[in-house]
């Protein structure tokens, strides 16, 4: 009897696992040459593995999307995920794969974007490189929507920290022509921002992200162009935002100002500020209230009719 119970438990575990995630596929974002790219033999991608086994990816030259599809899609919704890392590296596991697999549990496709990090060595205009990758990722997902059983009207963007800056840049500048004109829209249908960098204005910006994206001495025009609280319009997609009040890396005012701009233009938005959590809490800290944000986000997507 004991062995039968163990077998049944093991079978149930395997069945449940296969039902959550149906398949994973990785595709290059660009099938042709990358617009505005500069070839550099001295610049090549590398990966750092932390003591806890998580990966940090640096020096991306060939951006990709890793597509995690659920076995049972929930109204065909998908979220492209931009991991953070101060535009210097990508917290690929912590703020990418973990989030994608969690989304799969609710029937949502999680698509992790490994985007190029701004660098003059490989980009003619480094401030436009990450945005170009994000725009093309949205278009690529829409091209494959039928194949992956997705709804082209339910493709969202999400981002953590500097990835949140990229996600908010795409949300406000999806029509900016940074490589060529395309017939497929790059506009996300909704956005999820987690402790995002939003502004490039001091003293509220994250200094490292600003320097790597815009350079050491950016012009006022460039600063304003990438201060996304200044770029919100009525066309900005509905947005869910999460931040901790005690964030010492990216001040919570980044999220507050963005929410206020969304509210000004009557864009549906929800902002959750937690008393404690610091920066980089990912899906949340086990013993803190930040562990609740994902459940709140799911309810927001239900209320917004993105999922059932």
Image (cartoon, rainbow, N blue to C red):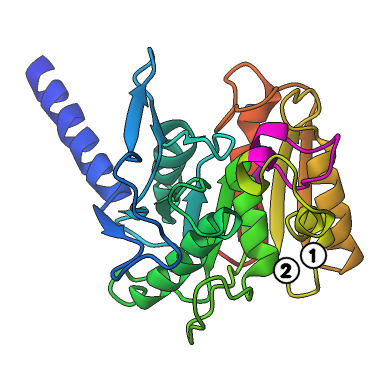
Residue 224 is situated, as x and y percent measured from the top left of the image, at 81, 57
- Up-down relation of residue 283 to residue 83 (above or below): above
Taking 300 as reference, is 86 above or below it? above
- Residue behind mark 1: 232
Q: Which mark is residue 18?
A: none
| 159 with respect to 268 (left or right) | left
Indicate yes or no whether the magenta region holds residue 210: yes
Query: Residue 186, relative to residue 13: is it above or below?
Result: below
**Region in magenta:** 192-211
Viewer-proximal residue among 230 and 278:
230
User: In screen coordinates, is 150 left or right of 288?
Assistant: left
Quadrant in the picture for the N terminus: top left
Q: Characterize the local packing of mark 1: few (<14), some (14-19) or many (20 or more) Cα atoms within 10 angstroms.
A: many
Q: CA distance from mark 1 to mark 2?
A: 6 Å
Q: Report if residue 307 is visible in the image.
A: no
Q: In the rendered image, which residue does mark 2 sit on?
A: 236
Q: Residue at x 44, y 41 (%)?
A: 96
């Amino acid at each position: 009897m004991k062995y039968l119970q163990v077998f049944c438990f093991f079978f149930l575990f395997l069945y449940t696992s296969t039902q959550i995630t149906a398949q994973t596929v990785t595709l290059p974002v660009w099938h042709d040459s990358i617009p505005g790219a500069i070839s550099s033999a001295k610049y090549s991608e590398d990966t750092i593995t932390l003591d806890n086994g998580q990966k940090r990816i640096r020096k991306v030259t060939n951006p990709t999307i890793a597509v995690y599809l659920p076995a049972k899609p929930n109204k065909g919704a998908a979220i492209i995920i931009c991991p953070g890392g101060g535009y210097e590296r990508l917290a690929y596991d912590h703020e990418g794969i973990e989030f994608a697999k969690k989304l799969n549990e609710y029937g949502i496709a999680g698509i992790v974007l490994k985007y190029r990090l701004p660098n003059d060595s490989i980009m003619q205009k480094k401030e436009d490189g990450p945005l170009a990758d994000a725009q093309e990722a949205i278009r690529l997902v829409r091209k494959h929507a039928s194949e992956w059983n997705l709804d082209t009207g339910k493709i969202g963007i999400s981002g953590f920290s500097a990835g949140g800056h990229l996600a908010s840049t795409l949300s406000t500048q999806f029509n900016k022509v940074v490589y060529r004109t395309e017939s497929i829209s790059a506009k996300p249908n909704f956005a999820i921002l987690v402790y995002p960098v939003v502004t490039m204005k001091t003293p509220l910006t994250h200094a490292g992200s600003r320097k790597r994206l815009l350079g050491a001495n950016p012009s006022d025009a460039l600063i304003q162009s990438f201060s996304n609280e200044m770029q919100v319009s009525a066309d900005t997609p509905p947005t869910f935002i999460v931040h901790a009040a005690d964030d010492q890396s990216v001040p919570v005012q980044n999220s507050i100002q963005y929410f206020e701009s969304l509210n000004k233009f009557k864009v549906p938005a929800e902002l959750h500020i937690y008393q404690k959590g610091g920066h980089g809490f990912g899906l949340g800290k086990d013993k803190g209230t930040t562990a609740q944000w994902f459940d709140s986000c799911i309810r927001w997507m239900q209320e917004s009719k993105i999922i059932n």
